[in-house]
Amino acid sequence: MDATDLNPHKRERRKEARPGELLEAALDLFVDKGFAATRVEEVAAHAGVSKGTLFLYFPSKLELFKAVVRENVVRQQTEGAQELARFEGPASAMLALLMLEWWRRYGATKASGISKLIMSEAHNFPELAQFYQEEVVSPGLALVRMVLQRGIDQGEFRPVDLDLTAHSVIAPLLFLMTWRHSMAPCCPSSQNIDPETFIRHHADLLVRGLST
Amino acid sequence: MDATDLNPHKRERRKEARPGELLEAALDLFVDKGFAATRVEEVAAHAGVSKGTLFLYFPSKLELFKAVVRENVVRQQTEGAQELARFEGPASAMLALLMLEWWRRYGATKASGISKLIMSEAHNFPELAQFYQEEVVSPGLALVRMVLQRGIDQGEFRPVDLDLTAHSVIAPLLFLMTWRHSMAPCCPSSQNIDPETFIRHHADLLVRGLST
Amino acid sequence: MDATDLNPHKRERRKEARPGELLEAALDLFVDKGFAATRVEEVAAHAGVSKGTLFLYFPSKLELFKAVVRENVVRQQTEGAQELARFEGPASAMLALLMLEWWRRYGATKASGISKLIMSEAHNFPELAQFYQEEVVSPGLALVRMVLQRGIDQGEFRPVDLDLTAHSVIAPLLFLMTWRHSMAPCCPSSQNIDPETFIRHHADLLVRGLST
Amino acid sequence: MDATDLNPHKRERRKEARPGELLEAALDLFVDKGFAATRVEEVAAHAGVSKGTLFLYFPSKLELFKAVVRENVVRQQTEGAQELARFEGPASAMLALLMLEWWRRYGATKASGISKLIMSEAHNFPELAQFYQEEVVSPGLALVRMVLQRGIDQGEFRPVDLDLTAHSVIAPLLFLMTWRHSMAPCCPSSQNIDPETFIRHHADLLVRGLST
DNA sequence: CATGAATGAGTGTTCATTCAT
DNA sequence: CATGAATGAACACTCATTCAT
């Protein structure tokens, strides 16, 4: 029978889970509606808290946005990279695997909405763009270059410009991802191609184009 | 006969020039800051008129946006197609030409910012997204398919899935364009590849991959 | 061959008619939509001139309104009063005639919209209200009192308070007029009574109530 | 135990009192200046809150207006009718009571300004006019007809057209009310008659005119 | 005189942010 | 910690008024 019993506010459920729930709600809404069109009240409501509570954890809408990006952007890539390192087959299969796995692990997930979001808002938040470039794009390109180099070393691929070719690998993936979060939901599904089919086809085209 | 006489503007009211000036200012600002972050008063100021004048020519901010899209996107796409029809060389050269010309005529211009904008705002203005899909993307894909079909008919290309391959042609272009208006301005130039070099390289890769 | 011949603006059709046309258009629109909801551009358009021309004749929207009131309010009453003076029958018939004629000559006309307008806007333009009171209401009441006095003098009517009774005569007329310009157009016609029938019935009721 | 303790307001947020305070402020201002000329910021200021707070309780200016009408017009009309039902005297007294009570309970109050406002703005808000007709005018006329019918049934009144006569009862009341909120405040008081005196006199005139 | 393009102050409405409870 | 009522700056849009032609 201490004082706390008299305190009518007992509903201290999952206090430390709050920021996470807010970030998740914010991710959904930012991806769905963009930064400007998302109201913080909505974010709070989706997380089951009040508007005031959101500002307890994030000092402003902008900081919330940055936190969402930081939280969702990094480290998705590393696991895939490690698995790829263990791969023992030919570089052509490795390239296709790299593309498909990246799509499955990131491109097809909700988190990929962040990439689209970053591109949409890059001009308003250049620091985020740079952060993304350094943490995600550059390592990704390096990974691709590594696979290409291996193919060249093994005599499987022609000696090509690694950087340019890496972009030919990555560009369709990023295009696919951007499209999925912008045009695709607005257009009749018949217009849209199946991502995995396209990736496989594109990988095949690349491998043929790269073959010695 | 002083310099001022050569200036055709002075203070005269010129109804006919206004919409164009406003559209140009709106293009710059929408591309630069996005739809929501652009204030109509800014657009008016950039065009050298007052807020009220803008509403004399465009009934709302949204209609101004649509006008910008109509003015800058549709028009540019058709001319290139006509020139391509007159091309007589092999399909491989035709494909490279198509890609390079599209980039020079549209991708590299200010107007291409509109495409990026449409993708960014697609969820807020689904009608525009659909308009873009129908007026720009679909015709573009059809053009590419036509070139591919010609290459196949002439025995230059393998018989491939036209739709999937067309996306392999277009995706890097759209990626390049999106990138140019989002990440590129925020990142050290060394990170960014040269568009035309990349396009040529990608075209070469595709042609090799398509060759019989 | 003076300078005026060189003036290319010859279309001086009905120059002096302009203010009248503007006043008429303004009357229609003010009555129909109220002062605030009427746009000067509409008034000008209805008069077949440009917005600028309106301000050539009336220095402001407010002055236009005042001019409309001044133009339409006075002098309608005097003719009826003179005809009434020549009437020779009993006071009861005279009273009914007064009421019916006022309705026919003013209440049923477009000009009566001004009375409704004055009441609606009285608080915003007190000077107009006073003007109306002095030029229209007071003379009208005096006329009614005169008829009542004659009836009393001739032994037709009981000796009643002239002022109070005059209001019993006038109130239903003003009510009818107000109603016609406000509620009546918005409600199913079945709800509305026929003005002349009502006036006749009301006059009969009054005469019976006044009879000795 | 100083005076401030007795003040229940201080600075505490009190959600429940706000709509009422806003409605009262809106009533005052709408009646005073009309719908268009009243700025929402003024209403808020009169209620002691900011503009934003008003929109917390009423989604738009129009809805605020409708709420004012609902709050001040409908409610007041019903109570009087119930009291009248308990009246046991002759129909002539009942008629006078009906008129006087209506005036005391509604016509003489601030709320009656709403009726005048509805008439002023009827053309701009036809739905409100119809609402007023159905909820206030029609029931009021029915009440009067009921009294008249009772008088006829009891042999007190001649058999007259109920609808026309009901208008003779109501018209002067509505006139009085309209007048009070338009001309009266603008004109020297000597010109204006005393409402209750007039109502009594008019009731007497009607009863005499209706008597068998 | 007449025009109508241009203006800019003014208004309704939204929404990120604050803070008393 | 959490709430949600309150705020006020910001913005799209209107319209009476001006003035160069």
Image (cartoon, coloured by chain):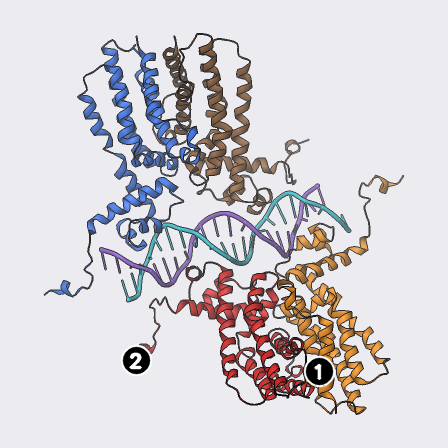
Chain colours: A orange, B red, C blue, D brown, E purple, F cyan
Vertical arrangement, residue D32 with respect to residue B82, above or below:
above
Vertical arrangement, residue D79 with respect to residue C55, above or below:
above
Residue at mark 1: A205
Q: Which residue is depicted at the point 74% across and 89% down?
A: A211
**From the viewer's perspective, is C10 left or right of B135?**
left
**Dot 2, crowdedness within 10 Å: few (<14), some or many (≥20)?**
few
The answer, for residue D94, to whether it is visible in the render is: no
Q: CA distance from mark 2 to mark 1?
A: 64 Å
Q: Which residue is depicted at the point 56% across and 40% down?
A: D48
Q: Chain of mark 2?
A: B
Q: Nearer the viewer, mark 2 or mark 1?
A: 1
Which is nearer the eye, A96 or A120?
A96
Percent position of residue B116, x then y: 59, 71
Residue at mark 2: B2
**From the viewer's perspective, is C10 left or right of A160?**
left
Name which residue type carries label 2: Asp
Vertical arrangement, residue B156 with respect to residue C20, above or below:
below
Q: Secondary structure at mark 1?
A: helix
Tell which residue pokes out farthest to the left in this image: C1
The N terminus of chain A lies in quadrant? top right
